[in-house]
Image: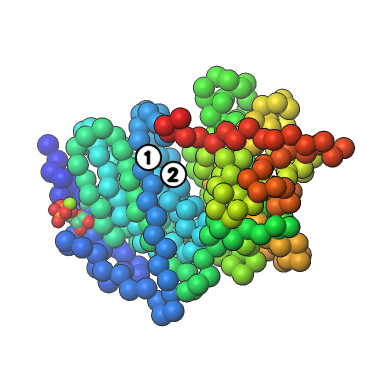
Amino acid sequence: MTSEFTLIHRHFDRAARHSTLAVGDDAALMQPRAGMQLAVSTDMLVAGTHFFADADPRALGWKTLAVNVSDLAAMGAEPRWALLAISLPAADENWIAAFAGGLFECAGRYGVDLVGGDTTRGPLTMTVTIIGELPEGEAITRAGGRSGDDVWISGTPGLAALGLAALKGGASIAGEARERCLAALHRPQPRVALGIGLRGIASAMIDVSDGLLGDLGHILERSGAGARLELAALPLAALREAGADEALARRCLLAGGDDYELLFTAPPHVRDAVLALGQRLQLPLHRLGALDAERGALLLCEADGRCQPAARRGYDHFA
Ligand code: ADP
Ligand code: MG
């Protein structure tokens, strides 16, 4: 039987690049850079709730860290350090090695040091606490949206939900499109560079983890605003190309979770700056509508101007 300490040492103890002291002591030591503020977030993934228990461990390792990186991206922060609390049903070394491989791949990609954590036996769950930095006072919160601001989304939201629908048998997606959807679901690419680039440009921001409408609802609530989204502006092309019919494509885009794209608001006078940033990052940025509805309202509008209130269907663990 492998001991807890051997497991930690073998799989989770790797050289840290920008930490004074990392895995192995009673606490880690890190030094924020001068003038920087810390941004801290934590996210838990539970087998059966957030992923299938037989999920590929390497992809799971990537995603466990990636969803946390995404939370920092959504503040405009740069991820720097992470802690991993993991509960495992058994010391299956092949599984742990693959999981750690995926996690460190993501850590390397986004410049994150794993500086500590906790390892116990129990039902399979992973909790990451992530710590990042940003120049003091430059965080982009959910509360900064103002009446008249544009509403933007990055990338190709909805692919992850379509991938999940395909896995569950609710959508028949084949070939390369299926691979693209499953990659979006299993290996999300948090938009860190976009988040950082939007400092001083975006007024409010959130990452889409529970569905675009639900997450926009959080911005509206915190900003005391209302929004109109133009149905014609929804970036549905990738979903249609993947084989989704119109209803499924809309549902995946508006209510699907797990995309980890950035949803943000910005005043109309910075439109060119937003588009230039998208060009520089080679990331499509779509303007979906504006904060120009009554406070608390979220309207979906046809090209002829007819609008309907959107059913807010974000994911809620207790609803
Ligand atoms: P303690 O009993 O003092 O809490 P632990 O035995 O839990 O220490 O952990 C030993 C060291 O290994 C600590 O530095 C802890 O942060 C680190 N650690 C434990 N589990 C993990 C993990 N899954 N990933 C990264 N570091 C871990
Ligand atoms: Mg401990």
- Between 163 and 268, the one lying in front of the other is 268
Label 2, on which residue?
A: 63
Residue 45 image label: 1
- Residue sitting at the far bottom: 34
Q: Position of residue 36 (x, y in %)?
A: 43, 74
Taking the image as shown, residue 121 lies to the left or right of residue 163, namely left
Q: Is disc 1 surrounded by few (<14), some (14 to 19) or many (20+) residues within 10 Å? A: some
| Rendered residue at 49%/52% (across/down) | 70
Q: Do we see residue 262 in this rendering?
A: no
Q: Nearer the viewer, mark 1 or mark 2?
A: 1
From the viewer's side, name the closer residue of 105 and 188.
188
Give percent across and percent down for residue 155. Answer: 65, 48
Closer to the camera, 140 or 312?
Answer: 312
Disc sitting over residue 62 in the figure: none
Disc 2 marks a residue whose amino acid type is Lys
Identify which residue is drawn at 33% across, 73% down: 31
> Badges 1 and 2: C-beta atoms under 8 Å apart?
yes
